[in-house]
Image (cartoon, coloured by chain):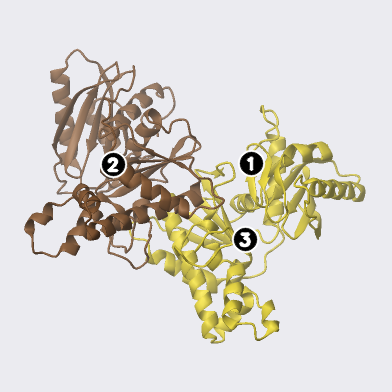
Chain colours: A brown, B yellow
Amino acid sequence: MIAPLSPVHLGPGAAVLAFDVGGTDTKATLVDTSGALLDTVRVPTPLSVDGTGDAVLAQVEALAARFRAAHPTIDIRAAGLIVPGLVDDESGIGVFSENIGWKNVPFRDLASERLGVPVYFTHDVRAAGAAEYTLGSAGQYSNVLVVVIGTGIASAIFVDGRPYSAHGYAGEIGHAVVDPGGVLCACGGHGCLEAIGSAGAISRLYRAGLGTADPVDNAIGAREVLERAQAGDLRAQKVWSDATDAIGLALAQSVALLAPEAIVIGGGLAQAGDALFGPVEKRMNSFLTFHRRPVLLPATVGENAGLVGAALGARRILTAEPTTEPTTAS
Amino acid sequence: MIAPLSPVHLGPGAAVLAFDVGGTDTKATLVDTSGALLDTVRVPTPLSVDGTGDAVLAQVEALAARFRAAHPTIDIRAAGLIVPGLVDDESGIGVFSENIGWKNVPFRDLASERLGVPVYFTHDVRAAGAAEYTLGSAGQYSNVLVVVIGTGIASAIFVDGRPYSAHGYAGEIGHAVVDPGGVLCACGGHGCLEAIGSAGAISRLYRAGLGTADPVDNAIGAREVLERAQAGDLRAQKVWSDATDAIGLALAQSVALLAPEAIVIGGGLAQAGDALFGPVEKRMNSFLTFHRRPVLLPATVGENAGLVGAALGARRILTAEPTTEPTTAS
């Protein structure tokens, strides 16, 4: 397991709010002018029953009011808002979230109206990737892939130093097929990387192999599967090696196409450290011949990488304000 | 089969030379101020026995002298030079060519010295891709993948309207693994797309299935394999469908990661038209769920796309000359 992370610090700049709307919980923080995450809270995310995202926006507004009341002397200049699903950074629209239930919500502009400050808006994994790229160990490279492996798998791509989103569709390495005709994925496809290599898949595939005899086993997560594998459980070893094989293959395919100098791996599964990075790197390299071998790096910003990326984006639109589109920095 | 192409025309601009150094032949042309390919020649490429690329450079110089002697009234202002292998556009260096035999040759600067004009230098497939992107049907899109399928398979990537090369390593879709542990590839890997889906592989895999009984069969190319498949030859059908399946899978993987709006397919195999595009598109789409589906387009610039891309690049460095790096436009 890798060492605990030191608290993240963004450095001096404007005070901003950051909101990370997740499928289960929403995290929010106030970043002060020193760059510290001064006050971080976590609340359940409300479902958007009518597809308008209004419940989410109302919650963001209430959280902002709470931060302002608690810190009346701090001049909050901007906010960063990140959400899951399909997100069009350029237009500021949350195109689709199956989990939370919205469709085509112009989050950036609506949040800016409600909060009274300019809002930076992007996808949660792209924000986390930007935090890693800006503050983490991959900042020295121009071409970087940041892969976040948790319940699902997604990535943020940096091309010649710039984030690449393709209207929100890029970086879906979790839904690149590594096993044609393989196990069903939540997206409706078969044999996607996410259906084999994510923490969710590791837990699910291991439990499926156990049958239904022991209801206690329903709580077995990827961490427990790894612990059982290390203790000699052959079924757990198979699930874990299938997962690392799939991740290594998908990374090798990305290397052939994009040739990143560095690949950063974050998300819950990255906490497995060498037990993940060792077999993934070995498998990836087994497919590479003349290709440029990337360095594999663990994410260093930690569990608040999304919030940090949102806050960095909020600060960036303030410094970019003299341009024609003050709220569309990307 | 698709319709014959009309002659390519670059439009008005400076008169430039273009050289496309291939593994077998070198093509060269003089583009006049109207943008026509005025005088196109093809000569065998000399091997670089000492790794210096001198034989290639001497041939380029001799061809330039021939063009100048034949067209004494034309003011040749720049040249474009493209080569296969691993090419670092930024530094102007031909890093490696296994076929022709050079290593780390600063082609751009050496060619510029020999020719007495600024030289644009890049990889052959990136040049062909740029020609397709500039003059072909994909120019309306920002994010485009141009895949060239011939003896080998490579691609040129356009990200937010700009070519992406990653010091020459990007776009190697031919050496992305689509069948882990599969058939040996020329690169030393196993199950690379190129080892299954290229015209070379189609011919080779079909002939391997025939055994050695009939030496006449050694001349069977991908076109003949397709003709035999269409005439009911089951083995030819299997080789062809394995190839289109592999191409469709690799394209779907590229779509998950890069989400191009359009994928242009060129090279010799694209001459198969619907027999290629039909099954490839069907297979690609079978792997896509929420992903953005790209349009598949046949290349339209034709067999001289590399030369055209080289000439376009040569013209571009002339218009970019006021900048600090007159010979490094990319």
Q: Amino acid at mark 2?
A: Gly
Please state the chain letter of the residue tagged with numbered disc 1 in the rendered image. B
Residue drawn where x is 15% and y is 52% of the image: A220
Residue drawn where x is 89% and y is 50% of the image: B66
Q: Position of residue A238 (x, y in %)?
A: 28, 59
Residue drawn where x is 21% and y is 54% of the image: A203
Is residue A110 placed above or below B211 in the rendered structure? above
Q: Amino acid at mark 3?
A: Thr
Residue bearing the label numbered 3: B300
Please state the chain letter of the residue tagged with numbered disc 3 in the rendered image. B
Q: Position of residue B82 (x, y in %)?
A: 70, 49
Q: Does residue B274 appear left or right of residue A218 in this picture?
A: right
Any part of residue A109 in sight: no
Q: Pointers 2 and 1 in contact (CB under 8 A)?
A: no
Q: Earlier in the sequence, mark 1 or mark 3?
A: 1
Please identify, in this view, whether the residue under mark 2 or under mark 1 is nearer the observer: 2
Q: Position of residue B207 (x, y in %)?
A: 61, 78
Q: Amino acid at mark 1?
A: Asp
Q: Does residue B234 appear left or right of residue A21 in this picture?
A: right
Residue bearing the label numbered 1: B89
Q: How many marks?
A: 3
Residue bearing the label numbered 2: A267
Indicate the quadrant containing the C terminus of chain B: top left, top right, bottom left or bottom right.
Answer: top right
Tell me if mark 3 has few (under 14), some (14-19) or many (20+) residues whose alpha carbon lies within 10 angstroms of its own.
many
Please identify, in this view, whether the residue under mark 1 or under mark 3 is nearer the observer: 1
Q: Does residue A158 appear left or right of residue A105 in this picture?
A: right
Q: Nearer the viewer, residue B94 or B52?
A: B52
